[in-house]
Amino acid sequence: MRYISYTKSVDSDGGGKEYTLFHIEFYETEDGKTPVEDFMDSLDNKISTKLVGLLEVLEEKGTNLRAPYTKHLEDGIFELRCIFGNDIIRVLFFYYYGGLILLTNGYVKKTQKTPRNEIKLAKNRRNDWIRRHGIDKLRGD
């Protein structure tokens, strides 16, 4: 695994209570595979390093990070945009309760528009993740 979260604690109320506003997790299949992690491992080291840096910025800024770094695609699915030389990398994700940013899939961009199958895959993985780990399960209900 190349991505190591550097979650930064924030003392927002001045009362000494520290917490993180956002944290990144990788979508995990039922059989334990992490597709975005595998995708990142397949990338060249320089591109992967830049992507890790952008993930850190995303984790720090969360919903405040806008273009050119992120773009809302549709139905709550966003893309993190990474350009390195002629290589264009995209990682799709969604925001969830409690500051969670869940990375669903990644791909090397070769066309002008985001491929429909990548958006559909992100939505399917979001639905699967919510079914298995949704807010009721997070609360212990």
Image (cartoon, rainbow, N blue to C red):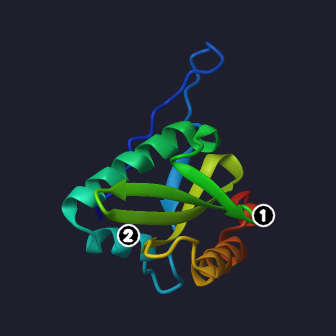
Q: Which residue ends up furthest to the front in the rendered image?
A: 112
Quarter of the image for the C terminus: give it. Answer: bottom right
Mark 2 and 1 residues: CB-CB less than 8 Å, in contact?
no
Dot 1 amino acid type = Asp
Along the line of sight, the residue nearer the viewer: 100 or 60:
60
> Can residue 38 be seen here?
yes
Left/right placement of residue 77 relative to residue 93 reads right
Number of the label disc, if any, that sits on residue 37: 2
Whole-percent x and y of residue 36?
43, 71
Kindly report the distance in space between the C-alpha atoms of the residues bearing marks 2 and 1: 27 Å
| Residue drawn at the location 22% of the way across and 57% of the way down | 46
Whole-percent x and y of residue 53?
35, 46
Quarter of the image for the N terminus: give it. Answer: bottom left
| Residue drawn at the location 38% of the way across and 69% of the way down | 37
Q: Which residue ends up furthest to the top in the rendered image?
A: 14
Residue 113, by quadrant, is bottom right
| Residue drawn at the location 41% of the way across and 65% of the way down | 89
Left/right placement of residue 4 relative to residue 20 reads left
Left/right placement of residue 45 relative to residue 6 reads left
Q: Tell me if mark 1 has few (under 14), some (14-19) or many (20+) residues whose alpha carbon lies within 10 angstroms of its own.
A: few
Q: Is residue 36 above or below residue 10?
A: below
- What element does badge 1 sit on? helix
Q: Tell me if mark 2 has few (under 14), some (14-19) or many (20+) residues whose alpha carbon lies within 10 angstroms of its own.
A: some
Number of the label disc, if any, that sits on residue 99: none
Dot 2 amino acid type = Glu
| Residue drawn at the location 43% of the way across and 50% of the way down | 55
